[in-house]
Amino acid sequence: AQSVTQLGSHVSVSEGALVLLRCNYSSSVPPYLFWYVQYPNQGLQLLLKYTSAATLVKGINGFEAEFKKSETSFHLTKPSAHMSDAAEYFCAVSAPNTGFQKLVFGTGTRLLVSP
Amino acid sequence: NAGVTQTPKFQVLKTGQSMTLQCAQDMNHNSMYWYRQDPGMGLRLIYYSASEGTTDKGEVPNGYNVSRLNKREFSLRLESAAPSQTSVYFCAGSWSSTDTQYFGPGTRLTVL
């Protein structure tokens, strides 16, 4: 079975600072991994996804994530935070090539950006 | 394209009342999903439909039923609402089970 752990329910950064949101996964097979973002009162939208190609994945709005098998991690980073990045971020995992697979989401990390 | 749409946006029910949440997509998705989102718990899958004509239980199906009316529409029904079903409900669709899921804007449901 797959699972995801997101460390820190809230992360606070200053505008212009590095953003680091942590995600560790558990999977019995090589996983697909996703980061979604949810802005207030909206649905989730995809930031980026890892599907076993390049381990460093670039997404929208300057975000990127690196798949590290040895650490079972898929942390999300952005070099310089903007006020508009304030939102909730969800990591999710699925197990491809094993029949119909459901995404398993983490509990989310709320990013707060201060001026 | 409208993407994934949900109606209504907000709903208040009394305990024991029933209602149906509607979801429609115009993205030709094969698979559709219903999630609930509660504070501190992320998204939990209620039901899903891998393809038109099939539905299956997710993580938290008790108290809900679903209908995949056709390829475009996937509805969620609460037969007898309970306060524990107060939540934000999201519908999503994808072309395959391992593909990106596209989410609707959500329905905020309060059960008194």
Image (cartoon, grey):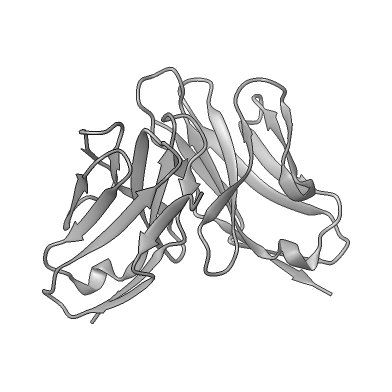
Q: Describe residue B80's horizontal placement relative to residue B71 as left or right.
A: left
* Residue A69 higher or lower than A42, as above or below: above
B60 or A1: nearer the viewer: B60
Could one spot residue A111 in this view of the protein? Answer: no
Could one spot residue A96 in this view of the protein? Answer: yes
* Residue A115 higher or lower than B52, as above or below: below
Q: Which quadrant is home to the N terminus of chain A?
A: top left
Residue located 20% across and 49% down the image: B66
- How far across and how far down the image is residue A42, in percent? 53, 64
In which quarter of the view is residue B90 placed?
bottom left
Q: Describe residue A63's horizontal placement relative to residue B71 as left or right.
A: right
- How far across and how far down the image is residue A104, in percent? 44, 41
- How far across and how far down the image is residue B4, in percent? 44, 51
- How far across and how far down the image is residue A84, in percent? 74, 65
Residue located 39% across and 19% down the image: A98
Furthest-top residue in view? A97
In which quarter of the view is residue A101 placed?
top left
A15 or A70: nearer the viewer: A15
Residue located 28% across and 48% down the image: B74
Q: Which quadrant is home to the C terminus of chain A?
A: bottom right
Q: Describe residue A79's horizontal placement relative to residue B69 as left or right.
A: right
Residue located 20% across and 33% down the image: B53
B18 or A79: nearer the viewer: B18
Count how many numbered circles sit on residues in the image: 0
Q: Describe residue A98's horizontal placement relative to residue A87 as left or right.
A: left
